[in-house]
Amino acid sequence: MTNQVNQTAGIHHITAFVRNPQQTADFYAGVLGLRLVKKTINFDAPEVYHLYFGDEYGSPGTIITFFPWANSRKGRIGAGQVGVTTYVVPEDAYDFWKERLAKLNVAAEETERFGERYLQFADPDGLKAEIVARAEGPASTWSFGGVPADKAIKGFGGAILYSGAPEKTANLLVNVMGLVKIGEEGGYARFRATSDIGNVIDVNVDAMEPGHGGAGTVHHIAWRAKDDAEHALWRSHVASNGYQPTPIVDRQYFNALYFREEGGILFEIATDPPGFARDEEQAHLGGKLMLPEWYEPHRAQIEQLLTPFEVRVLEGDQQ
Ligand code: ZN
């Protein structure tokens, strides 16, 4: 059976390893102004948080997630990973962010690719991120601390993939995931997905040193499937192209399947529904530790293993 679903809208979420939940909240909510939309646990390791940050709703294309693990070894960013996560802000907000990062002592470098200016910086664990200003993508409705909604991050602009086999990764993006190649410049090939957020993917053209996992590296990148029916089709599509997808697993807020691509990067395909309002009211997203029902009987023990933290306005924003 053939199908026509094989074009992802773009990035669903990106998941990374860090060390400290408070430090992570202070950076992604405090500095970057994202909303903590879900505080839960790693379903495979319940002594570790799984923290989701995004726009007000945790919309697909805006969600950066973390496993903070105090004892994690430090990773090395390199081939086989998402190298840089790109956040997109409104067209007129570039200078706001340049000034904001400077004010909050986040060292940023300005670079240019494909005719766009980028502010590149690292989070406290060394994860590489960048900000780009674009007209496309719906404006954020969330404001926090020193970030008003009209300057706020709209979501992912995209990502830079560091591939161990760039031609194969490029081939996968175009011929399996349904992105369109739009150019090549300065050592990167650029691809676009159909959405107006989480849609611009750059891939290194030349070979690069392999990375290894650990704190300060991305674990996987998830791509969007519109619903469960399309998700099932994605699974057979990926398999029929020679990849080995996992069974579909229930991640509470989406269903997921995973496969390792030939460049070494772990890809996930995740469904847009049901989303983060599944078990908390929209107004209170991220307010409480949420557990899947099979862990509820162990809540007391689990809570004892987790270090409390809070989403708080940074001192530098209190004036
Ligand atoms: Zn994931």
Image (cartoon, rainbow, N blue to C red):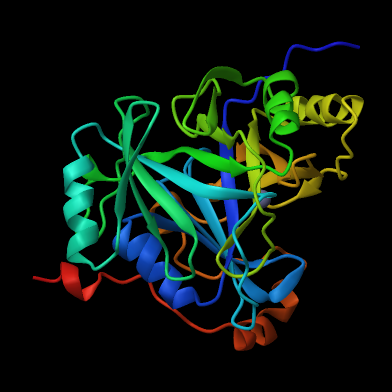
Which quadrant holds residue 71?
A: bottom right
For residue 180, side relative to residue 5 (left or right): left
Q: Quadrant of the C terminus?
A: bottom left
x then y, percent, for residue 107? 29, 62
Q: Quadrant of the N terminus?
A: top right
Going 49% across and 47% down the picture, which residue do you hit?
85
Q: Is residue 242 above or below residue 303?
A: above
Going 20% across and 40% down the picture, which residue do you hit?
93
Residue 278 in sight here? no
Residue 30 in sight here? yes
Going 23% across and 49% down the picture, which residue do you hit?
97
For residue 233, side relative to residue 10 (left or right): right
Q: Nearer the viewer, residue 209 or 174?
A: 209
Q: Nearer the viewer, residue 39 or 178?
A: 178
Which quadrant holds residue 316?
A: bottom left
For residue 25, side relative to residue 163 (left or right): left
x then y, percent, for residue 131? 35, 45
